[in-house]
Amino acid sequence: MLDNVIYAWPELLKSLGETFYMLVLTIPIAVAIGTPLGTLLFLTRPDSFLKWPKFYVLLNGVVNLVRSFPFLILMIAIIPFTRLVVGTALGTTAATVPMIINAVPYFARFIEQVLLDVNRGVVEAAESMGANKLQIVWKVLYTEARSGIANAVTIVTVSFLSYSTVAGLVGGGGIGDFAIRYGYYRYQTDVMFVTIVIMVLFVQLFQFTGNFVVRKLDKRL
């Protein structure tokens, strides 16, 4: 039993590195693009600040359209675009393209909901003191919603750790590719058991870290 695990260990470490490489590229970009996108969704709602209902309907429709694609189908459907962006449709870097496209609207929805949960009275108080829209967004909404945003980052990170395993089905590398080679083709259940334990530990670590940050940022606690 240990012989299989020891033999596969270097390959397992490499696969984990590829998986975290996908996350390191995907999550920051999703946050950087998804945050303003979600903010725009919030601001353009019919009952919000900007009152651009037609723009909101269009933007809302695009976000819903991208989110409606199952991740595996999305990876296959945008292969020509992935090849255009990174020069190839195979490999770890190529797998991050559909992950980012999927993660951005996913995170944007979280941001929209988090901002909707901000106490309206705080916003109205800022308006009464003469704060402009940019100040309200940056100094009021983001400040009040910071714990919710941290929680959203945690959820997206854990979710896309799972999504990254799908990349192995289309030559994206990572832990999914490792699972296919050792769990499906070779049926080495001992290696798969160790892999599952490691992944569970990482999920718990991400969740514990995220919960800790949320508690530190939430002024209600």
Image (cartoon, rainbow, N blue to C red):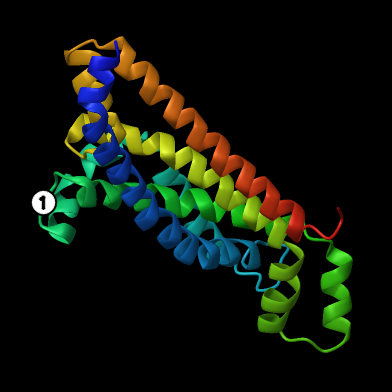
Q: Where is residue 101 in the image (x, y as percent from the top left)?
A: 35, 52
How many numbered marks appear? 1
Residue lying at 44% horizontally and 61% vertically, measured from the top left: 28
Judge whether residue 85 can be spotted in this image. Answer: yes
Residue lying at 73% horizontally and 86% vertically, measured from the top left: 132
Query: Who is closer to the viewer here, 154 or 72?
Result: 154
Quadrant containing the N terminus is top left
Residue 199, compared with residue 47, is above or below; it is above
Identify the residue under disc 1.
Answer: 88
Residue 106, compared with residue 147, is above or below; it is above
Q: Where is residue 76 in the image (x, y as percent from the top left)?
A: 21, 38
Residue lying at 64% horizontally and 50% vertically, measured from the top left: 151
* Element type at mark 1: loop
Q: Which image quadrant for residue 195?
A: top left
Looking at the image, which residue sits at the far bottom?
130
Q: Position of residue 53 (x, y in %)?
A: 60, 63
Q: In this view, does 171 lie to the left or right of 162?
A: left
Q: Which image quadrant for residue 3?
A: top left
Judge whether residue 62 can be spotted in this image. Answer: no
Q: Which image quadrant for residue 128?
A: bottom right
Q: Tell me the kind of residue under disc 1.
A: Thr
Residue lying at 51% horizontally and 32% vertically, measured from the top left: 201
Query: Who is closer to the viewer here, 20 or 54?
Result: 20
Q: Is residue 165 left or right of residue 203?
A: left
Residue 137, compared with residue 214, is above or below; it is below
Q: Position of residue 188 (x, y in %)?
A: 25, 12
Quick one: label 1, few (<14), some, or many (20+) residues within 10 Å? some
